[in-house]
Image (cartoon, rainbow, N blue to C red):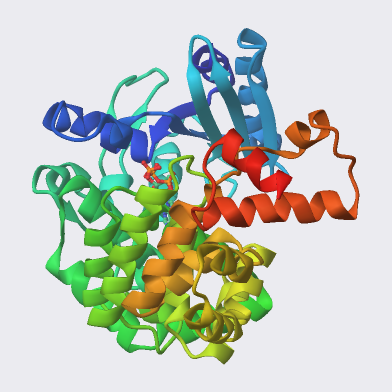
Amino acid sequence: TAAQLAEQRGWQIYLVGGSVRDLLLIDRYQGATPTEELLFDDIDLVVDGFHQAADQAAGVELAKAIQNFFPNAKLQVHGRFQTAALLWHEDEALGSLWVDIATARTEFYPYPAANPEVEASSIRQDLYRRDFTINALAVRLTTPHQGELLDYFGGILDLRESLIRVLHANSFIEDPTRIYRAVRFAVRLGFQLEPQTESYIHHAIASGIYAHIQSEMEHTPALQTRLRRELKLVLEASYWYRALRVLARLKALVCLHPNLEMTPGLWRQMRRAHRTLKHFDKANSLEHWQVLLELLIASLEPAERGKVAEGLQLPAESIDRLSHLHTTEAAIAQTLPTCDRPSQIVDGLSPYDAETLVLVGCRSDRALRRQLWQYLLHWSQQRPPLDGNDLKQLGYRPGKDFKTILETLRNATLDGQIATVEEAKALLQR
Ligand code: ATP
């Protein structure tokens, strides 16, 4: 439908970006890589070939035409004319699907669209602005030449040779988040960074690219937003540890802060956090990637932590947690050694959220850590055999004493003095 509409107008539609790459990789990875990596839930289309300025809203018009056929799809329009997105959220037939329809990023050409040179040059320009050769491939969806694969920069050869290669020397200087993308794609697809591309990364980092990111934040948050997105994608992936190793080898963590580097101690903390989160957070209610990122930031001087978190636009509670981590750690290190009983530990730790305790636990010594994990895994979950409703049924009325009784029951349970309803009732009799 969209293709027919486009053809009537003399437009071209192309499938571009990650889905072309992944389609071409399907044979290679069938069964050999987690299917999550090749999901095709995110499709990028580019419309091109205009002969009137008004056609620059082509992406939006096409999106509307498609929506007529799929009323379940939600339409979003970004920018004035440029991009439209169609979203299917948990659709019965399609599952979750996101289709971005962009208008080719090119100047307006006052020539007839039939001129193939003009058409070719505008999609070529669009592809040239992309990050890596393997992400700069396009498939034409409209006639003539429907199904044609456009490969202006050697992407097919790089796919075959498993190489991540940028399109031009300044790529990483222009957009340092591409360093993170290069590593993410390399590790995820089992590709290598092409040697020249890796030398461009070294050059970008040696030239102080991180200072650019940090100063950019004062003017426009766009770069920081992209950096946070890439950090999230890396840290929530199953291959996060391997990717972080490559990023550390490239010294790419300076993009977050000039003093940030992976020491053996920090690696241990990261492994610990990963194990603990997997073990204790079965309900998956903590944002694991965010805790890992906070742990990286926590390795910086206390005065720097809040600033870096703020720069990356982490949520307010995350900024707050990192800004106060040094005082929290000092308070916990002072309180816990004075506690003899679990109930005292629960009293000491209950003011803090789980993320804080995971951070403190990963960074502290073994004795303190053992108490923190016991608290997170067992004591914080333990409930007395009688709760408030049971007490009401037994004839107790809510009030000050009621709270004291509940606390007594909780403490006795935590300290192993009672475990059953009978034992709880016997305690109440005393
Ligand atoms: P994934 O499967 O991880 O979503 P993807 O290739 O679809 O991979 P996206 O981040 O969705 O990645 O980006 C879509 C396309 O946009 C990319 O394939 C690439 O062509 C282009 N792109 C994205 N980010 C950049 C960037 N920072 N610089 C240049 N091009 C980019």
Q: In this view, does 193 lie to the left or right of 63?
A: left
Residue closer to the observer: 361 or 31? 361
Q: Residue 253: x, y in percent? A: 36, 77
Residue closer to the observer: 315 or 249? 315
- Give the image quarter of residue 58: top right
Q: Residue 263: x, y in percent? A: 27, 83
Residue closer to the observer: 22 or 3? 22
Q: Is residue 336 above or below residue 68?
A: below
Q: Residue furthest left?
A: 161
Q: Is residue 241 above or below residue 421?
A: below
Q: In this view, does 93 lie to the left or right of 73?
A: left
- Give the image quarter of residue 221: bottom right
Residue 173 visible in rendering: no
In the image, what residue occupies the spot 34% across and 49% down? 237
Q: Is residue 267 left or right of residue 292?
A: left
Q: In this view, does 323 lie above or below 230?
A: below
Q: Which residue lies furthest to the front in this view?
A: 430
Q: Residue 26: x, y in percent? A: 20, 28
In the image, what residue occupies the spot 55% across and 38% down? 102
Q: Residue 260: x, y in percent? A: 38, 84
Residue 397 visible in rendering: yes
Count the labels in the image: 0
- Give the image quarter of residue 112: top right
In the image, what residue occupies the spot 53% across and 23% down? 10
